[in-house]
Image (spheres, helix red, strand yellow):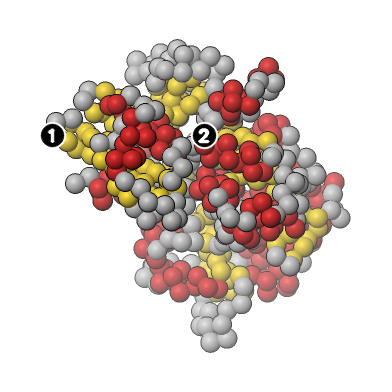
């Protein structure tokens, strides 16, 4: 079960079919296979070998996908890195991972090189795009030059075990330094197989790479879409108008969006001017999404919707809100109730929601416990962090630190992170429940709820909200809206109006930043 087998099979079965649409560039599976083999040969000739780490700092592009496959071909480990990070962040990740080389865009060179100039070991750099004529390339080479000069003959895939590392993904580091999550060939291969089965991917599907490819909100599709011989369509980064244009022009059938993206798409003033009839499925993942946004997605795009939940540590999917057969004929509002849950367990995942004593919660949609999981798609651990691995992986179960309930049908609903639960006046309040109510307000664009220290209540609930453009909001109006829909103790005691909310690249709210700023 090596990931290199996936492209070999696709090329054998669909050599002349369209594999890549990236701007003006289009490649068949035969073209793609040739490019990957030439890149792999070049990497091998440059001295990269089995389990060497190669970092990639790049926007979405066919070269990102080629790098995933070329690294696996020679048995190297790809380290996808967020291109928006600072030079200091780059420096930390390159050193921590022990990266021997970097693949990056020409326009990122200045930040990349400033992050490695003080390193004791030289790091080989491969540049995509066109470096400036005046650019001092130093210890670097140009990506397309490597591909043009290499032969596609005579390089067999590396012989490695499927338990070997295939990628290292660095977490967003909202509570400290990022840590590397190791995923093996088997993790990613089994996840691809199970995803194909769950959402019925076929060779007719045209996948839009819109969530960042350095993040597992999108990276898993590299393997699954290729495995079925579908078409990969790329946009370099999210722009609502460009995404809508691409859906129409390239007849996109399926994609996974971060909730922030979906909120921007459904509220785009020209969304109805575009033809999105090709869409058969929209998936949402990477962060919680409010039911009101889900309703707008279904109303706007008229296709199937699935909410997903997962983690970097789990390849990523753990649940999907796919309706069981006996639920599909329910009235829309009842179906929406299930679609808006975090979902039922993903194929191949053993999932339990347990109380502090280790016993499972009742399926009453009320009792709260921690989600724990195990299966073939779960990470073997954190890169060079045995103590943290031991802390999170216990007796084969990964402890997610996500709190959830389970309903009578076995659908899970996340209510909060352990670190984000608010205890006010002795009562537990889950911030996501309050945020969902805030999103129902017609004037609110985004919302985040935190607990801050309070001498009387222990913690008081503070809502940080971003009004929609042109709307005026008052603290009293927001609090009354919440009190009309929630128990009084769950309503915010303070409302802060903000221009924007701090988020990670996966769309998750940085509540630690909110607490630092508004904790008083």
Give the left or right position of residue 319, taking residue 394 as reference: right
In the picture, the quarter occupied by the N terminus is top right
Q: Say which of marks 1 and 2 sits in front.
A: 2
The residue at 53%/14% (across/down) is 408
| Residue 289 coordinates in the image, percent (x, y) | 50, 38
Give the left or right position of residue 66, taking residue 112 as reference: right
| Residue 208 coordinates in the image, percent (x, y) | 67, 51
Q: What element carries label 1?
A: loop
Q: Residues within 10 Å of mark 2 (few under 14, many from 20)?
A: some
Identify the residue under disc 2.
Answer: 291
Q: Which mark is residue 455?
A: 1
User: Do the residues under discs 1 and 2 have CB atoms within 8 angstroms?
Assistant: no
- Is residue 200 visible from the viewing direction of this image? yes
Compared with 101, 341 (above or below) is: above
Q: Quadrant of residue 297?
A: top right
Q: What element carries label 2?
A: helix
| Residue 139 coordinates in the image, percent (x, y) | 52, 75
Tag 2 or tag 1, which sits nearer the N-term? 2
| Residue 276 coordinates in the image, percent (x, y) | 71, 49
**Viewer-proximal residue, 346 or 69?**
346
């Amino acid at each position: 079960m090596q990931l290199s087998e996936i492209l070999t099979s696709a090329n054998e079965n669909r050599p002349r079919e369209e594999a890549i649409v990236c701007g003006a560039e289009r490649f068949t599976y035969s073209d793609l296979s040739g490019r990957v083999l030439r890149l792999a040969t070049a990497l091998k000739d440059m001295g990269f070998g089995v389990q060497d780490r190669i970092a990639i700092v790049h926007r979405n592009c066919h070269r990102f996908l080629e790098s995933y496959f070329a690294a696996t071909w020679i048995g190297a480990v790809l380290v996808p890195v967020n291109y928006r990070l600072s030079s200091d962040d780059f420096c930390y990740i390159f050193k921590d991972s022990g990266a021997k080389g970097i693949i990056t865009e020409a326009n990122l060179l200045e930040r990349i090189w400033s992050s490695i100039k003080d390193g004791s070991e030289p790091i080989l750099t491969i540049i995509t795009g066109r470096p400036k004529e005046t650019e001092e390339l130093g210890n670097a080479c140009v990506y397309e030059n490597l591909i043009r000069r290499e032969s596609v003959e005579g390089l067999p895939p590396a012989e490695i075990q499927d338990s070997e590392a295939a990628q290292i993904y660095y977490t967003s580091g909202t509570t400290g330094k990022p840590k590397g999550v190791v995923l093996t060939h088997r993790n990613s291969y089994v996840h691809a197989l199970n995803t194909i089965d769950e959402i019925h991917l076929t060779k007719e599907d045209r996948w839009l790479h819109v969530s960042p490819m350095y993040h597992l909100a999108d990276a898993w599709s590299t393997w699954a879409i290729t495995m079925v011989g579908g078409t990969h369509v790329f946009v370099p980064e999210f722009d609502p108008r460009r995404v809508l244009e691409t859906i129409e022009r390239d007849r996109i059938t399926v994609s996974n969006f971060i909730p922030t993206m979906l909120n921007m798409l459904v509220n785009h003033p020209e969304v109805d001017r575009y033809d999105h009839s090709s869409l058969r499925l929209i998936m949402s993942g990477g962060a919680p999404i409010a039911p009101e946004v889900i309703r707008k997605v279904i109303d706007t795009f008229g296709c199937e919707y699935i909410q997903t939940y997962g983690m970097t540590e789990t390849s990523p999917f753990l649940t999907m809100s796919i309706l069981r057969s006996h639920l599909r004929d329910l009235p829309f509002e009842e179906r929406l109730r299930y679609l808006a849950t975090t979902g039922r367990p993903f194929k191949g995942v053993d999932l339990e929601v347990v109380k502090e004593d280790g016993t499972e919660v009742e399926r009453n949609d009320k009792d709260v416990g921690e989600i724990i999981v195990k299966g073939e798609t779960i990470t073997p651990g954190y890169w060079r962090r045995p103590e943290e691995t031991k802390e999170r992986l216990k007796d084969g179960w990964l402890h997610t630190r996500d709190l959830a309930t389970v309903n009578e049908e076995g659908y899970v609903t996340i209510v909060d992170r352990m670190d984000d639960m608010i205890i006010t006046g002795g009562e537990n309040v889950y911030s996501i429940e309050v945020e969902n109510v805030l999103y129902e307000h017609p004037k609110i664009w985004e919302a985040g709820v935190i607990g801050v220290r309070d001498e009387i209540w222990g913690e008081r609930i503070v809502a940080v909200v971003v009004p929609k453009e042109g709307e005026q909001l008052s603290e009293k109006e927001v609090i009354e809206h919440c009190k009309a829909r929630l128990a009084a103790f769950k309503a915010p005691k303070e409302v802060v109006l903000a221009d924007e909310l701090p988020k990670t690249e996966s769309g998750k709210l940085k509540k630690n930043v909110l607490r630092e700023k508004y904790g008083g």
